[in-house]
């Protein structure tokens, strides 16, 4: 059996944090002189840093070009997150089963990468302190600091994987929101939907094939069995 590529979401899949996403984005934009902004009624989970900053920018400058300030906005967001994490104004915790799951996949020589709405620096800040960052192939990872469209990140991840000889049918996306499921569907990948965030199992399961909806990552052996069953050659 060919070894899979596992594409991991971060927030509410690998870790949970007390950081208020809306507050962090609002402060970052304020540092650029953009405000006031509001995220009331906005579903933040599953979006990219870039898309949420662009949304905030458009509230103040409806006809403005966000791309002209994107780099500075991401830099400000990284700085706000870094300051809050280092000052212990926010707690970050690894979710149950994550460490065992990552280690088990690594022992099986599964390739692992990140498919996240976080910028690369914010991903590092959330994962590095727990020793999780080295599990991920950063050359195959995609981060949310350059695209407002999460499915575009999935397409980039697939292209990177195919560039090293991988195949579409080897890709598995793991995440906790319907947007993660949509990313997997956009590239024809398998998907493991984990109800460790705000979405229920019913909300995550789209009724299609090639999806496993589970309550947590505690049972990594079951996940391995499912992945290998999905990828097994029918002739084997």
Image (cartoon, rainbow, N blue to C red):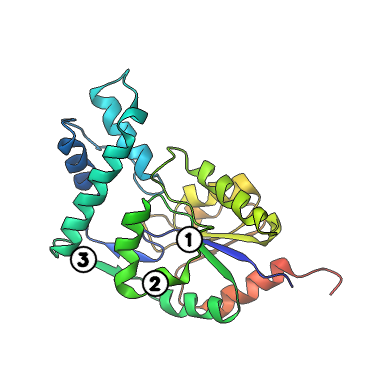
Report how far apart the C-alphas of labels 3 and 2 lie in the structure: 16 Å
Q: Secondary structure at mark 3?
A: loop
Q: Which mark is residue 91?
A: 3
Q: Which mark is residue 183?
A: none
Cβ–Cβ under 8 Å for marks 3 and 2: no
Mark 2 burial class by Cα count in 10 Å: few <14, some 14-19, many 20+: some
Q: Secondary structure at mark 2?
A: loop
Q: What residue does disc 2 label?
A: 132
User: Residue 170 placed where, x, y %?
Assistant: 67, 62
Is the residue 196 above or below the residue 53 in the image?
Answer: below
Q: What residue does disc 1 label?
A: 138
Mark 3 burial class by Cα count in 10 Å: few <14, some 14-19, many 20+: few
User: Residue 201 placed where, x, y %?
Assistant: 48, 59
* Image quadrant assignment for residue 9: bottom left
**Could you tell which of marks 3 and 2 lies nearer the N-terminus?**
3
Q: Residue at x 43, y 71 (%)?
A: 134
User: Residue 51 placed where, x, y %?
Assistant: 37, 38
* Image quadrant assignment for residue 218: bottom left
Mark 1 burial class by Cα count in 10 Å: few <14, some 14-19, many 20+: some
* Image quadrant assignment for residue 107: bottom right
């Amino acid at each position: 059996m060919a070894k899979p590529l596992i594409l991991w979401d971060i927030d509410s899949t690998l870790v949970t944090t007390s950081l208020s996403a809306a507050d962090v984005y609002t402060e970052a934009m304020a540092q650029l002189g953009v405000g006031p902004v509001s995220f009331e009624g906005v579903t933040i989970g599953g979006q990219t840093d870039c898309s949420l900053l662009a949304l905030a920018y458009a509230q103040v400058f409806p006809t403005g070009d966000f791309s002209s300030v994107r780099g500075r906005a991401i830099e400000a967001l990284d700085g706000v997150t870094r300051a809050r994490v280092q000052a212990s104004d926010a707690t970050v915790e690894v979710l149950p089963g994550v460490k065992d799951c990552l280690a088990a996949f690594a022992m099986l020589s599964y390739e692992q990468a990140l498919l996240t709405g976080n910028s690369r620096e914010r991903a590092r800040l959330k994962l590095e302190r727990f020793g999780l960052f080295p599990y991920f192939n950063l050359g195959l990872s995609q981060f949310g600091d350059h695209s407002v469209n999460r499915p575009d990140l999935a397409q980039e991840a697939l292209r990177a994987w195919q560039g090293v000889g991988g195949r579409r049918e080897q890709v598995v996306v793991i995440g906790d929101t319907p947007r993660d499921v949509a990313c997997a569907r956009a590239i024809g990948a398998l998907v493991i939907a984990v109800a460790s965030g705000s979405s229920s199992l019913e909300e995550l399961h789209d009724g299609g094939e090639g999806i496993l909806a589970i309550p947590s990552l505690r049972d990594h052996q079951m996940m391995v069995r499912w992945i290998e069953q999905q990828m097994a050659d029918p002739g084997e």
